[in-house]
Amino acid sequence: MLSRYEFALKIASEFGLDAGLIRPIATSELGQKANRPLRAGLLMDKFRSHFPNVPVMGVGEALQLLKRQMSGPRN
């Protein structure tokens, strides 16, 4: 599992962005009007049990695919 901070660093790395601009902060520093869960994510067990033949990508692989799609030909 990745924190939001770690996820942002992976995105910066994959897309060649300045990871130095990303800093971890406490949720309380965000000043959000509504409470948000501290830990959010997807549990894949149920998905995998219902769709055993559908491959599930890891974060790195999914970011690489997104990057390829974004740099591909535009219609």
Image (tube, rainbow, N blue to C red):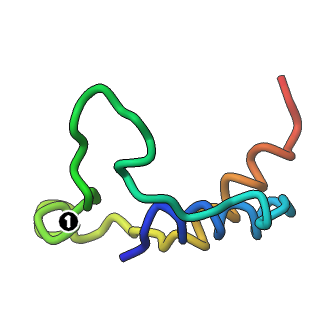
Residue beneath the point at 46% across and 61% down = 4
Residue beneath the point at 85% across and 44% down = 72
Q: With 36 as the anchor, is 56 left or right in this view?
A: right
Q: Quadrant of residue 50?
A: bottom left
Q: Nearer the viewer, residue 5 or 26?
A: 26
State which quarter of the image contains the C terminus.
top right
Point out residue 17 in the picture as x, y percentages from the top left corner: 84, 59
Q: Vertical placement of 57 versus 63: above or below? A: below
Characterize the local packing of mark 1: few (<14), some (14-19) or many (20 or more) Cα atoms within 10 angstroms: few
Q: Nearer the viewer, residue 10 or 36?
A: 36
Q: Nearer the viewer, residue 4 or 16?
A: 4
Label 1, secondary structure: give it: loop
Point out residue 34 in the picture as x, y percentages from the top left corner: 24, 30
Q: Quadrant of residue 32?
A: top left
State which quarter of the image contains the N terminus.
bottom left
Point out residue 74 in the picture as x, y percentages from the top left corner: 85, 29
The three-letter code of the residue at mark 1 reads Leu
Point out residue 62 in the picture as x, y percentages from the top left corner: 57, 63
Q: With 6 as the anchor, is 27 left or right in this view?
A: left
Residue beneath the point at 28% across and 59% down = 41
Residue labelled with disc 1:
43
Q: With 14 as the anchor, is 27 left or right in this view?
A: left
